[in-house]
Image (spheres, rainbow, N blue to C red):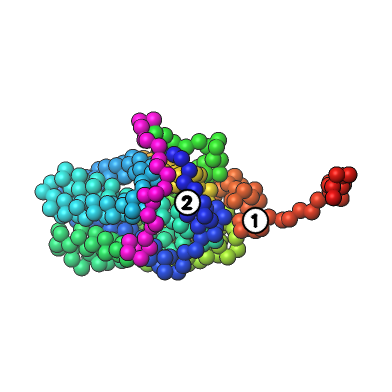
Amino acid sequence: MRPDPASPGARGEGGDTGGGTIGRGFVALLATAHFGLSMALIVPMAYSLALRVDRLAPGREETLGYILGFGSVLALASGPLVGTLSDGTRSRLGRRTPYLIGGAALGMVAVLVMAAAPNVVVLGLGWGLASLGWGTALGALGNVQADRVPHRLRGKVAGLTGFTMQVAPVAGVLMVGTVSGSGLLVFLLPGAAGAVLLVPFLLFAREPDRRTRAVPDRLGAAGLLRSYLFSPRAHPDFAWNWLGRFAFFFGQTSSTTYLTFLIAQRLEMPLADVAGIVAITGGISIVTTTAAAIGGGFLSDRLGRRRPFVFAGAAIFAAGGLVLAFAGTLPALLAGSALTTLGIALFTAVDQAIVLDVLPDRETAAGRHMAINAFSQKVPGALAPLAAPALLAVGGGTGANYAALYGASALLALLGGSIILWRVREAGRDNPWQPVAAPAPRRRPFPSAARRPRREDP
């Protein structure tokens, strides 16, 4: 793709220099749109699809896993391709807005398909469309962050969007819980909320017309294949951060997936009776997420440091994992759960700012690399549940070995944080304790290096 010298980053409005001019209004509109789109995507996963599966295939809970897996694979496979197309789009609405609008429109169509599905096959197809539609819109919103949020505000914005992603599902489930008897409203309400909350952003945070920008090279079969790849040698900071995220989220997914079963085993309670305790952990997680995501993002911008916060998040999560590994009482289980959610929120919010800092080819391939970065979280989400049974079987006892599972999760998370702390360079700085926004020191020449006057000098 030929460079676009008139792009925002080239003018210092979203590149590494951090000279952007966005205001509080833009940030508020971005957070509101992120809240709505997160609700539209996550609420069906957490609640609505389970209700529909129970009606269409009672007693076949495994069907829900197949449906969710299909949607995840579809969204994962399409992400880099859609990102590459977005990077090369030239339209009056900009290069991200068409995908915001198209993704939300496809998501609303999927809502109607899922609500009217006569069987699980149609329901699965509907969820595939929803994953593609709402996932595309959320990805485009993330690309807007990469394009327009300057360096000095990336921690704050990442903290706010991370907070909305945690709170939106809770608010959405509470909303649709009041209409659980309606097969239409449990899908329509979160989808409509996502579409409505996106409209203000489309109206008041518009992109510039990009029709006059440089035309991208034609995307052939080789270009489609390259959209799923990147060069670790050419972009080592992006690669190390990707690897650190992969290790952290592998450990995080392994532990959070089995929290309900862990509580039931340690308290010797039937699984059906654990719902109240899970609700308590959910309430605690809102408090810890708010403090860690928003507080960590703001502090990372204020202090000009990111990697220490990311490592702290991984260390806090690891501490919580070790508490859960050996907890045998309710207070200990609640404390371990609180520590893990605190660590997840702190790691995720601040590392998202690092992703924007080290993003390769920001002007020509930001969307593609943002989608590739998403692999570091989504691939562990698919693989970790498959690897966890091997750890649960360690020792060969009659019960599941949750100590081995949560201990391994803690080590993986700590490994991921350590990789980012010591291997990723922020803004070209090797020292993780040096502020990323620190001005480069001015050096004076040595006297012997000063230029001596020559005869021809006036």
Q: Is residue 376 left or right of residue 194?
A: right
Q: Of the residues shown, which amino acid type is indicated by label 2?
A: Ala
Residue 151 percent across, percent down from the top left: 53, 58
> Marks 1 and 2: which is nearer the front?
2
Element under label 2? loop
Q: Residue at x 15, y 58 (%)?
A: 183
Q: Is residue 361 visible?
A: yes
User: What residue sits right under mark 1 in the picture?
Assistant: 433
Residue 98 percent across, percent down from the top left: 31, 52
Q: Disc 1 and disc 2: Cα gap in Å?
A: 35 Å
Label 1 with label 2: CB-CB less than 8 Å: no
Choose between 274 and 113: the one closer to the eye. Answer: 113
User: Label 1 crowding class (10 Å Cα cut-off): few <14, some 14-19, many 20+?
Assistant: few
Q: Of the residues shown, which amino acid type is indicated by label 1?
A: Trp
Range of magenta residues: 201-222
User: What residue sits right under mark 2 in the picture?
Assistant: 6
* Furthest residue in direction left, as rendered: 118
Q: Residue at x 49, y 48 (%)?
A: 5
